[in-house]
Image (tube, rainbow, N blue to C red):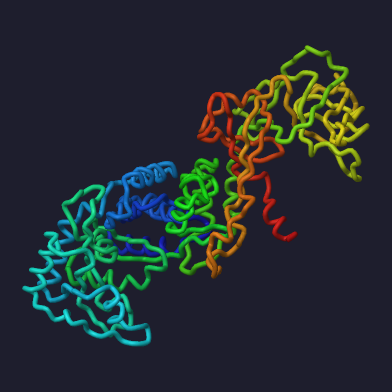
Amino acid sequence: MADEKGLNFLEEIVEKDLKSGKYQEIVTRFPPEPNGYLHLGHAKSICLNFGLAKDYNGKTNLRFDDTNPLTEETEYVDNIKNDVKWLGFDWANELYASDYFDQLYEFAVKLINKGLAYVDDSTSEEIAQQKGTPTQPGVDGPYRNRTAEENLRLFEEMKEGKHLDGSKVLRAKIDMKHANMLMRDPVLYRIKHAKHHRTGDKWCIYPLYDFAHGQSDSIEKVTHSICTLEFVPHRELYDWLINKLEIYPSKQYEFARLNMTYTMMSKRKLLQLVNEKYVKGWDDPRMPTISAMRRRGFTPESIRDFCERIGVAKRDNMIDFGVLEFCVRDHLNKVALRRMMVLDPIKVVITNYENGKEELLTSENNPEDEAAGSRNLPFCHELYIERDDFMENPPKKYFRLAPGGMVRLKSAYIIQCDEVIKDEKGEVTELRCTYFPESKSGSDNSGLKVKGVIHWVSAKHAVPAEVRLYDRLFNTEDLGAIEDDFTNHLNPESLKVQQAYAEPELVNATINDRFQFMRIGYFCLDLDSTKDKLVFNRTTTLRDMWSKEQKKG
């Protein structure tokens, strides 16, 4: 992470701690809750935690914060592990907060014995009222001064399942008048009679995040516990619990979370989109989840580059979605195989090319990479070109095909449009052209000069394909500022499906391949593809068209 740009504030902290001898090895952790799929905000945290450890020869634990059995599933655990590995990282230890349930229970008992925790029979509404407001101090509840013996008995009964959900909680005994409302006797344990994805029915009481997180860090001897800014108020409780329990003093540090234009980063709202069928699943290529971006054709290199470019800050800011698209274009330009695909075809008949004759032309796979080699393109007397590459009445400086005009077919010949055929509605259905045999790409001695180059496919050899043109899921720039239902801001043009014609080489495409369909955009094969039906997803356009459209609007 450290380079000529200087150190970010977390790197400065780590270097200072190592130089002073405070730590011999730094230990970070990535602690997702397995209640959904990871999104780009998590990717930033992954790159930060694993990147810091890698740069300073430390280690990173992958720890699942699985303390809420009602929302967590093994499916999410497996997907999270897959996402972290796909991004290019591996963990020192795979751990779970549930690994520590016995130890966390003993920590709670220790607090009770020290007079620092008590069982409260108040309802959640009553507890909220007791806590007061930011400008009004809280008040002690009726159960705050129970004896340690009574609290131990009641807490044991909670553990044994003798009380109903919501009937009792365990609270820390701190200060109901504290300026930080989180320090006003926070809840540490609640009753939930629910089956846990790992511990089954062993437990019916579960620790809350604030109790499980810092103590898990301490058990693992995490040196730098890195959270997003919303956890700043929690740091005081984090330190208080570690201090009172007299355990390893892990330290919490906060950085700005990822906020990006036209993008929703709330896992709860993303789940709503899935459940209410606004999208086809967590991996719908319009979603900001890592799984969706992988399916859409983003590369791990491009996402790591994005996280590096946006940096680590102490204050929230808004990142332009175009930065992410720039990163993926930059990488795909280097690695994507060039192929030809016609989305909206118009037939071209080459009248002076012998009917039935075929030849194989050669085209390079990637001009940015000599090692990528070349491929064969079949050529015959009937071709498809894009309808947009022909104009019957062109303006000045129009360099594509027009009546009487010439254009070069990519990696093939120069052709001239001689005749335009239309149907009864006046729609152009066919162009009749002549080609110049001496103008073959790579050995052109025709003496002809043309400025336009267009792509094409052989009509006889073309392979039908479905092309899914994805765009931004929302059409509102700052979703954090909206006051109405966020689903009102969905972009109705976020997916367009077209039938297209592909060059025959694309029948050999695999899920891991990345393509630049010449003059159209970057694409990848979708999971829905079969041998009988090719399906391609657009990763991104060749240039940022969205910003231009927004400025027009």
Of 83 and 282, the residue lying toward us? 282
Please tell me which residue is depicted at 86% across the width and 22% down the height of the picture: 435
**Where does residue 247 sit, x and y in percent of width and height?**
18, 65
Answer with the quarter of the image where residue 100 lies: bottom left
Q: Quadrant where the C terminus lies? A: bottom right
Please tell me which residue is depicted at 32% across the width and 78% down the height of the picture: 181
When the figure is inspected, residue 513 is found, relative to residue 186, above or below; the finding is above
Of 160 and 331, the residue lying toward us? 160
Does the image show residue 172? Answer: yes
Does the image show residue 59? Answer: no
**Where does residue 5 sit, x and y in percent of width and height?**
53, 59
**Where does residue 153 sit, x and y in percent of width and height?**
8, 68
Q: Residue furthest front?
A: 424
Relative to 310, is 148 on the left or the right?
left
Of 475 and 305, the residue lying toward us? 475
When the figure is inspected, residue 478 is found, relative to residue 445, above or below; the finding is below
Relative to 476, is 78 on the left or the right?
left
Relative to 138, is 311 on the left or the right?
right
**Where does residue 133 sit, x and y in percent of width and height?**
35, 83
